[in-house]
Image (cartoon, grey):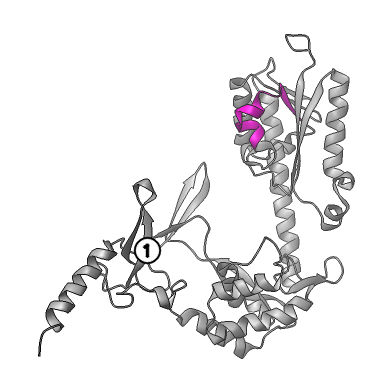
Amino acid sequence: MRVNGQPERWLVAARLSRVAKRDRDRGDALITGIQTQDTNSTDWAQQEGHVIVHVTHDRNVSGTVAPWERPELGPWLTDPVKVVQYDGIVAYDVSRLSREYFDLAWLRKWAEENHKKLHVIKERLHWPDSRDGTLWEVAAERAYEERQDMIERTTRELTALEEAGRLTNRPPFGYTSAGEKYDHYLAPTDDGRKYVPLIYQHCIEGWSLNTIAKWLNSEGVKRTAGKGWAASRLAGIIKNPVYKGRRCKREIIPPDEVEERDGKIIRYRYGAAWIEAPRFQYGKTIHRCEPLVDSVTWKRANEALSTREKRGYSDPENRAMLATALFCASCDDSPMYRVRTRGRQQRRYFYYRCTGRGNLRQSCGNMVRLELVDAAVNEIMASTFDLPA
């Protein structure tokens, strides 16, 4: 009981690593993992005389995701408005909180600092306790080892399926998964047969990726995952050899340097650019399927994509006066294009900015005020060419 005699308020932390499509279609009531955790936690609260204020259902969330980063549980650990609404957190087993050793240590420290209690039903753990946390450390180690065993078993099974030429991952746009369990293969969808050849053809014809994306959105074409189409997604489709009948293994391109935090890689450096995700290239063929475009069309579209000018949309009726004519003196004669910035009082300023060269270009950052450059060029032109005969 609380100091004021009222029942303690508890938050249920439920997590499920993977929700099968058939279970997701049927709803949470029939998802065994989530339902079991919710029911057991509610029964425990009733037996102890507590009340449940909320249940966080983190679906399709890996045990490696830190508790404070989970979409459902995270805000209840970090938002002061939510933190004051409960007295403790209960989970069915320790792996529902996390499978990472240091995350559980952080959670115990967080509980001490925020005067919260923790309870794990299956392992009968509670915090704070009269011991030094040894049982928590043992449970955390066990959860971590279970995760390592699952990774090893899953990797072994996927490798065996890949070697047998079976489908092992989510199908890309234009395809669906067909066949029995452990014998899946890619089969084209109606949208795939209709739109994939058109995507390649429009790319060959010179359409920009943004234009193709707008066209697909106007047609109401749905992606495999996510909302709407973007140029980056279309570039991935055009470069993917699966559309010419060969699903290839994606391999990480070794970075020049990595940055780590708490033993995890958070950034990758390729040349002068730092990015948060590694770059990939396609390797050996692991699955063959019905092609949606022929090899000649695939090659022509990729050549068109790689050789076109790497610029965004340009309005010919509103172009800057020196577009395509001004080059950077500090960056090996790279082209400079108009950009717009905002200053104080939301005033807008226009500049010519260096854009660099090449597919992976990096600008030197050189910027000059557009109106000053245009005025200087106008003055030079007037004083040089506007002379009486």
**Residues shaded magenta:** 75-90
Q: How crowded is mark 1: few (under 14 residues within 10 Å), some or many (20 or more)?
A: some
Asked if residue 71 shows in the view, the reply is yes
Residue 83 falls inside the magenta stretch: yes
Looking at the image, which residue is at 65% across and 73% down?
216
Nearest to the observer: residue 219 or residue 1: 219
Residue 349's x, y, as percent? 33, 58
* Total numbered circles: 1
Picture quadrant where residue 319 is located: bottom left
Q: In which quarter of the image is the C terminus?
A: bottom left
Q: Is residue 154 above or below residue 138?
A: below
Can residue 289 be seen in this snapshot? no
Amino acid type at circle 1 is Val
Where is residue 68? Give x, y as percent. Answer: 62, 37
**Left or right: 129, with 312 as reference point:** right
Residue picked out by circle 1: 339
Q: In which quarter of the image is residue 249?
A: bottom right
Name the one closer to the observer, 214 or 377: 377
What is the quadrant of the N terminus in the image? top right
Residue 210: name its quadrant: bottom right
> Which of the two residues, 72 or 271, is positioned nearer the viewer here?
72
Whether residue 143 is in magenta: the answer is no
Q: What element carries label 1?
A: strand
Q: Is residue 290 above or below residue 46?
A: below
